[in-house]
Amino acid sequence: MTAKERVWLAEFLRCFDATAAARVAGYKSARKQGWQKKQKFKEVIEDELTTKAMAADEALARLADRARLDIGPYVMMGEAGRVFIDLERLIADGLGHHIKGIIHTPHGDRVVFHDQQEALLTVARLLGLDKAAVSMEPLEIIVRRGSDEANRDRNT
């Protein structure tokens, strides 16, 4: 494999666009070369994708981990009753992957976590539990006062 081909392959595995990868690698006819390289390295690409692919049980375990996150131990009270998250401890405990992002505002930083309910619902859907859900339709209860004979007489 030439140096140019290594660049093409690395770029293709990053963007999955053969033509764009050929441009980055410096090929003049990027479309043609991209298609040819994709054919030439088909097995290498498949092996690389298989290696990088996440197994279903790993994906399910990660979703379950996200759904179970308890940030309670990391919530702290600051001055004037302000609440903050001890991010250093959370990250040191190996839970940094639960952070979706941090938004900087004039009033302080806002930590956004991945949606636990969405993760839980996704796990339920993958396990087929969403189809077995109990109906939440309202239950109609008829209350009759007195004997059945008295109620029958009133209705006639």
Image (cartoon, rainbow, N blue to C red):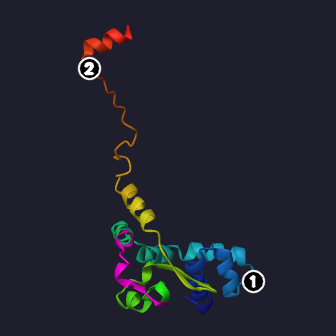
Residue pictured at 38% horizontal, 51% vertical: 130
State the separation of the CA atoms marked 1 and 2: 93 Å
Name the residue nearer the viewer: 64 or 71: 71
Amino acid, disc 2: Gly
Numbered badge on residue 146: 2
In percent of width and height, residue 131 lies at 37, 47
Name the residue nearer the viewer: 122 or 17: 122
Numbered badge on residue 105: none
Give the quarter of the image for residue 149: top left
Q: Residues within 10 Å of mark 1 (few under 14, many from 20)?
A: few
Q: Secondary structure at mark 1?
A: loop
The answer to whether residue 11 is left or right of residue 133 is right
Q: Residues within 10 Å of mark 2 (few under 14, many from 20)?
A: few
Amino acid, disc 1: Lys
Q: Residue furthest top?
A: 156
In percent of width and height, residue 146 lies at 26, 20
Picture mark count? 2
The answer to whether residue 53 is left or right of residue 153 is right
